[in-house]
Amino acid sequence: MSFSRALLWARLPAGRQAGHRAAICSALRPHFGPFPGVLGQVSVLATASSSASGGSKIPNTSLFVPLTVKPQGPSADGDVGAELTRPLDKNEVKKVLDKFYKRKEIQKLGADYGLDARLFHQAFISFRNYIMQSHSLDVDIHIVLNDICFGAAHADDLFPFFLRHAKQIFPVLDCKDDLRKISDLRIPPNWYPDARAMQRKIIFHSGPTNSGKTYHAIQKYFSAKSGVYCGPLKLLAHEIFEKSNAAGVPCDLVTGEERVTVQPNGKQASHVSCTVEMCSVTTPYEVAVIDEIQMIRDPARGWAWTRALLGLCAEEVHLCGEPAAIDLVMELMYTTGEEVEVRDYKRLTPISVLDHALESLDNLRPGDCIVCFSKNDIYSVSRQIEIRGLESAVIYGSLPPGTKLAQAKKFNDPNDPCKILVATDAIGMGLNFIRRIIFYSLIKPSINEKGERELEPITTSQALQIAGRAGRFSSRFKEGEVTTMNHEDLSLLKEILKRPVDPIRAAGLHPTAEQIEMFAYHLPDATLSNLIDIFVDFSQVDGQYFVCNMDDFKFSAELIQHIPLSLRVRYVFCTAPINKKQPFVCSSLLQFARQYSRNEPLTFAWLRRYIKWPLLPPKNIKDLMDLEAVHDVLDLYLWLSYRFMDMFPDASLIRDLQKELDGIIQDGVHNITKLIKMSETHKLLNLEGFPSGSQSRLSGTLKSQARRTRGTKALGSKATEPPSPDAGELSLASRLVQQGLLTPDMLKQLEKEWMTQQTEHNKEKTESGTHPKGTRRKKKEPDSD
């Protein structure tokens, strides 16, 4: 039947059209392609089950972002469907579509193809808009709609066209099986063929802190012909780098932001010390050391330890860590066919939990370390120590490595007057002169595997890790002591330390750039953040593994989504380690990506202008925090410079600039109590803007104390108990004492401090009133406070 004869079909009555439909379809197919109409319904239904999504895991369809399919405008060839049949009555078509939507059989058939109720509804709305708003439709769907309107076909005949449209707006429906294969994270050992090609010897050095386990592994590293050390922190990588070269073993350094080669000709040394993320899984070594192997369970970074454990090409792999990781490591090595030798170590020096809390900072002794879990607590404690005429060193996470080392050296120096350390829980970097660990609080903010922030008591593993820093075999303090600041916390600390450490159940995994690129091939219009969501949702893992939390990656992906970058470049930018709580660091990542997209190199001169160099020494805590953020930005530049050398060409100049900035920050931290005094004293103690009266002036301090002690009475408590009904009638101080958030002794101490300041304030007021009218008092020197 020729195409010209097919045009005569439009003049046939509706009943006869259906009889000739097969012939017309055959005639139109060469001109318009496949015709999935009513004749194909049987085959469509027959293949429904085979096309349905495989696997037992039901995908989270809320992650499927619908694409926009624009209605068709007027065609240059005219409305062929209308010429073959007749123009469609839009009112009748709307009735047909509504009937189609309500059909239970159609909804069930859609579910077989992965269209749950949500996707089915979204797809239908888009499909209906497309039909109703198009000036002309494809000839196949026009003919079917015409047949249905005249009773020559059933509404169900629309399903093939509806499904075709659904796959256009949800392309994931058309490639689910391929996506499942790409995101199949089962059997990770097979990802590392070089390591599987050799028979490795796995040696697990198991023991608590200060047991000598890492020392023995490092000695084996030093004596090997070639080796790699994989540490959790840049400072630890630096420490092994320095020790190795000092011992006459040439060793290179590799971290995310730094590469140091010790050979004069630039040739790689036989040994390398690196952060665990940077280790090579293709370079052969005689000995590899993986430190803190228990971090294989870390929700964000665990994948790096998994990669090192399964992928390092070393004849001997030495693992150092907690006994809690032994069972998991043995299970993982069983899948690789490698045996694990466990060497147990005992603590070299005794450690005891005291029966009394510190109660007051007046009871501090040389060698004490107060561990805080918030920066505000560090500032507050440092200020109170300074008031008592003592000097303290300060170490917390956002300080530059050089500043941390300088503060540690200051504390370790027996000739330095600084004998007290105030630090966060990251106190394991060469701090060998701690006599007593004092927990300022037992509540620590944490991020769970779902990316949710939690406030809970520290775990047994964390408590042991921190407490174990007291008393070192190589220091003058041979016996360690542990206690708490508040008496109420002491029983909880003892209970935490007595509990057995839960064994580690699973190791972290992370999608590679290649896997995400393959995902993007199938879903070219999806954003990188959406690709990650779908990948994690589709991923399949063995019971011994989990997919690491990727919220930080997604945060960066959404931040730079609007900037035109290739997928691989975008992926690299998103893996850059940034502190998303620092607005300046986040805006710098955005600016760096924008410059890159314009193909404009980020030169030394450009970066100096961007950070407004030169920078002044900090005058208050806010200035210090701003300088820390600038240091992080320079770290970000250096990190990117090793991935995009042509676009970030001035790494050596930026490193010199960073060292200069580190010195400025060191001076600021050295004078941190003065900075706190200038900016935070009134804010923390809330001494400004209140009417006279001790209760009102003490309220800010009481709230600060309450925040510090909140939740430490009951194990696992995430929130304090609500106040009693009559609590509103009591003063704030009475309520906090009643709830156990303050002790009477703490209240007396606060009142004493306030009375002292009140006396000084009244004295100043009296003195200022004795000056003759019209004269001005000499301004107090900043140091006079």
Image (cartoon, rainbow, N blue to C red):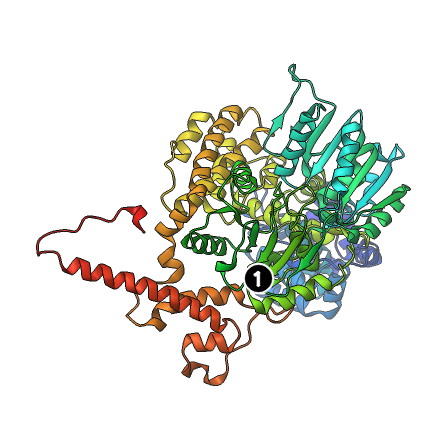
- The structure residue drawn at horizontal position 30% and vertical position 47%, both measured from the top left corner, is 782
Q: Could you tell me residue 746's position as x and y percent?
A: 47, 68
Q: Quadrant of the N terminus?
A: top right
Q: Residue furthest bottom?
A: 726
Q: Secondary structure at mark 1?
A: helix
Q: Could you tell me residue 125's position as x and y percent?
A: 60, 61
Task: Report whether 5 appears left or right of 426.
Answer: right
Picture quadrant of residue 770: bottom left
**Which residue is at the front of the view, 723 or 520?**
723
Q: Could you tell me residue 306's position as x and y percent?
A: 76, 44
Q: Is residue 721 above or below residue 296?
A: below
**Which residue is at the front of the view, 562 or 201?**
201
Picture quadrant of residue 451: bottom right
**Which residue is at the front of the view, 554 or 749?**
749
Picture quadrant of residue 48: bottom right
Q: Is residue 758 above or below residue 349?
A: below
Amino acid, disc 1:
Lys
Residue 172 visible from this viewpoint = no
